[in-house]
Image (cartoon, grey):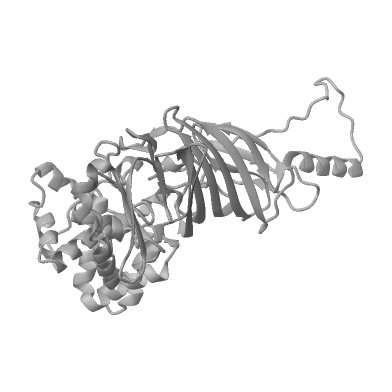
Amino acid sequence: MVSRRHRITGVPRSAPVVPAAPAVVGAVAALLVMVLTGCDGGERSTAGTSGLRDPYFPKSGNGGYDVTHYDLTLDYDPKARRLTGTAEIEARAEQDLNAFNLDLKGMRVTGVEVAGEPARFDHGGQELTVRPHEDLDEGAAFSTVVRYSGTPETITDSDGSEEGWLRTADGALALGEPTGSMAWFPGNHHPSDKATYDITVTVPEGLTAVSNGELRREDTERGRTSFAWRVGEPMATYVATVAVGDYETRSSKTADGLPAYVAVDPSQAKASAEVLARIPEITEWAELNFGPYPFSSTGAIVEREGDAGYALETQNRPVFPGAPGIDLLVHELAHQWYGNSVTPKSWRDMWLNEGFATYAEWLWNEDHAGDTAQDVFDALYAGDYYDSEADNDAVWAFPPAKPPSAARISDSPVYQRGAMVLHKIRETVGDDTFYDIVQGWAAAHRHGNADTAEFTAYVEKKAPGEDFERIWKDWLYGEGRPAKP
């Protein structure tokens, strides 16, 4: 956040000191409070913080308000690589505010309005500081409109992966985990603040723009086509996506009537057809294991190989860098429950996403004549799961609930050792209680946020006669490989 300091001028250094009457002193003091705080003598209004002090990304997100809805209107020209956007952000003030911040990196802001009035703003780095025409009262709902344009950035994450706005052979792909969404729209970019969305993207005729949620409208006029998408359930900014390109699209429904929308790069259509056809089957299996599907549509986006370096659990339809295998498809669809619906409060809780999705792979194979979850657990513990000794050793590099840095939140312990924690719980409580726990956890925090402490407390509440101390101490928070169970 840009800090503004008020400077009192006009009094020479050599001016004599003259005692003032008490009433004058009081009046001057009151005036100074008003000048320094921007208040009119009532409750003090303050600026919202420019970061939420996340353990790994302290500048991500912003304090003082809660976003309830984003309405994004985007126009993209792939040849010029130019994005023009208008973001209307509905929010509620969580304190009296005379200023607040939005995260936006690399774009040129041309205008900001708050509650229909032009607002002053400063933009530096990833911080867009907005000063409304009038202070906002705690509890007040307010709307902010930001107009911006430019060439969106590709952001290199601390682990070397690329996110943000990725240029592809025929368009673009927006990926947000953990901080990339601030490259293409202003917002409160931290997983703890979820909102609903309307995302309308206009592109040259002949290209398709795919996003989250359901396609509400597709119109072509004067050589450009607009695709209007709506997300009716809360979504964290890091799982918002836009994919622009030449796609083969298919709309269908599962046996329960859930809409499924798939967009595939033509180069991957043949290779991915068989596995994508199993989305309804996987969704039905996941509902039996994890509870009701939390969103109003499902599907997938498959890019050509090389356009993205990894798969991501973007809400409603995960993104894949080429035709996925069945395990990867199961993993990303399981994230719709664990990560997208139940979203971590901070990036320290990443294992609650990846441990669950990894264990979903183990369960799928166990239920489909593959290795059992116990087989996988034993192989990981023995150090012969991977072909490489270094990869086997990496599983024990740090505890899943305590990654040592931002660059390590997607490392092996978060995935594999996180799944091992779940398996230890299953061993302790038995299958019936275990499935009560994983389904109940998804239901208790549906469309919300949760952290590791809440999870461990939930497990202990669901199985009050069991002792989980060693699991938490050795497997969740302990350094190195625990003693043989």
Q: Looking at the figure, which quarter contains the C terminus?
A: bottom left
Horizontal and vertical percent position of residue 404 = 31, 44
Q: Is residue 52 visible?
A: no
Left or right: where 375 falls relative to 354: left
> In the displayed image of the protein, which residue is found farthest to the front?
222
Residue 113 sits in quarter = top right
- The foreground one among 203 and 350 is 203
* Image coordinates for residue 43, horizontal then vertical, percent: 75, 53
- 125 and 95: which is toward the camera: 125
Query: For this view, does 18 lie left or right of residue 344?
Result: right
Which residue is located at x 48 percent, y 36 percent? 223
Q: Is residue 354 visible?
A: yes
If the image is split into quadrants, where does the N terminus sit? Answer: top right
Place of residue 319 in the rendered image (x, y in percent of width and height, measured from the top left) = 32, 48
Marker count (numbered): 0
Q: Is residue 299 left or right of residue 365?
A: right
Q: Percent x, y for residue 40?
A: 80, 47
* Vertical side of 476 occupied by 56: above or below: above
